[in-house]
Image (cartoon, rainbow, N blue to C red):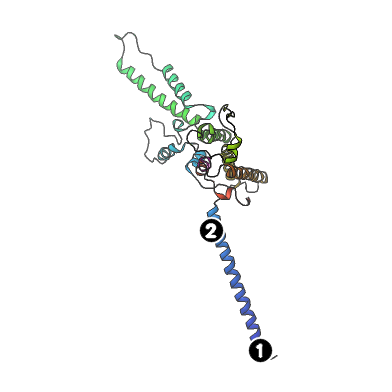
């Protein structure tokens, strides 16, 4: 073979190799693009979509009170030195408080302490000093404001432990998704013809003995709250925590099984859409394989 023909053969081989590399790069880029599109359509299998209810679980505040608290926390005006600074999360705006207190108990305790610490009014008005009484009342009101702010900060879930926040979120999920409250305003799935034929007139539904804590939507909501806690810890500095990773994977697969079961039983009903919309769950949370990287 002549040298010229040999060089031409090497050149054609290199051109074929370059075209093959270009086709492979184009195919890989297209596959990555399609994968990103599918991932965007399915959503995040761990967190799903952020909704107002999910934000309320993270901030320990009800959805309707988030705006007012953000406005308070971004207030840049300088407060008066005689008044306490605004709290980042007032206990009066929270649906649940720390130490298992209720808002009515907190308000009653504050009113009772205010009545106990009120300055006494002189019975002999002839020797009374109105100016001094007014000054004592002013000091008492200021002290009551400071005490109210201090107690609000103490019982606020913003200063509570992770265990207490989880307990409050679980109770909030039970009140939101429990069938003892959703049966009144959420449309249930219509019964099938087979179940209608099997049901007799003598059969009556079993009366509910207390709040609903075992239905699928309640358990899915509780698992979602726990998954977000573990995901926050795993995505931080504890990336190499194998125990946390295993626990997160177990909770994800348990929630996936419950979602598949509820999709089969309640898909198209008001319970399904109410749960999906409030928890921000996408198809990636119950379809396909969930991998924790």
- In this picture, is 268 found above or below 146? below
| Residue situated in front as seen by the camera: 86 or 234 | 234
**Residue picked out by circle 2:** 37
Seen in the image, is 224 located left or right of residue 113?
A: right
Q: Quadrant of residue 115?
A: top left
- In this picture, is 200 found above or below 1? above
Of mark 2 and mark 1, the one earlier in the sequence is 1
Q: Residue at x 46, y 29 (%)?
A: 152
| Residue situated in front as seen by the camera: 175 or 61 | 175
User: In the displayed image of the protein, which residue is found farthest to the bottom?
Assistant: 2
- In this picture, is 26 found above or below 90? below
At mark 1, the secondary structure is: helix
Image quarter of the N terminus: bottom right
Percent from the top left, x then y, of residue 232?
57, 44
* Cα–Cα span, label 2 and label 1: 48 Å
Q: Residue at x 58, y 42 (%)?
A: 265
**Residue picked out by circle 1:** 5
Mark number displayed over residue 81: none
Residue 265 lies in magenta, yes or no? no
Can residue 275 be seen by looking at this rendering?
Answer: yes
Seen in the image, is 122 located left or right of residue 155?
A: left
At mark 2, the secondary structure is: helix
Structural crowding at the residue carrying mark 2, measured as other residues with C-alpha within 10 Å and reported as few (<14), some (14–19) or many (≥20): few
Percent from the top left, x then y, of residue 256?
61, 45
Residue 273 lies in magenta, yes or no? yes
Structural crowding at the residue carrying mark 1, measured as other residues with C-alpha within 10 Å and reported as few (<14), some (14–19) or many (≥20): few
Q: Main secondary structure of the magenta part?
A: helix
Q: Nearer the viewer, mark 2 or mark 1?
A: 2
Percent from the top left, x then y, of residue 135?
34, 20
Task: Tell me which segment is drawn in magenta.
Answer: 270-275
Can residue 45 be seen by looking at this rendering?
Answer: no
């Amino acid at each position: 073979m002549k040298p010229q023909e040999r060089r031409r053969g090497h050149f054609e081989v290199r051109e074929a190799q370059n075209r093959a590399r270009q086709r492979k790069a184009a195919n890989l880029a297209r596959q990555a693009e399609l994968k990103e599109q599918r991932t965007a359509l399915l959503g995040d299998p761990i967190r799903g979509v952020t909704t107002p209810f999910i934000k309320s679980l993270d901030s320990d505040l009800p959805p309707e009170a988030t705006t007012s608290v953000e406005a308070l926390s971004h207030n840049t005006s300088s407060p008066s030195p005689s008044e306490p600074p605004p709290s980042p999360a007032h206990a009066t705006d929270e649906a649940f408080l720390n130490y298992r207190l209720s808002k009515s108990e907190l308000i009653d305790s504050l009113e009772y302490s205010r009545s106990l610490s009120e300055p006494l009014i002189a019975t002999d008005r002839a020797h009374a000093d109105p100016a001094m009484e007014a000054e004592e009342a002013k000091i008492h009101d200021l002290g009551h404001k400071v005490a109210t702010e201090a107690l609000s900060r103490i019982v606020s879930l913003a200063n509570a432990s992770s265990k207490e926040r989880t307990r409050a979120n679980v109770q909030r999920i039970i009140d939101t998704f429990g069938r003892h409250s959703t049966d009144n305003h959420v449309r249930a799935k219509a019964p099938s013809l087979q179940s209608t034929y099997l049901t007799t007139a003598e059969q009556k539904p079993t009366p509910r003995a207390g709040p609903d804590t075992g239905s699928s939507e309640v358990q899915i909501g509780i698992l979602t709250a726990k998954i977000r806690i573990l995901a926050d810890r795993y995505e931080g500095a504890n990336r190499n925590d194998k125990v946390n990773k295993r626990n997160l994977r177990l909770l994800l697969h348990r929630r996936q099984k419950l979602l598949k079961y509820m999709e089969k039983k309640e898909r198209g009903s008001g319970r399904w859409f109410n749960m999906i919309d409030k928890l921000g769950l996408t198809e990636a949370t119950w379809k396909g394989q969930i991998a924790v990287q």
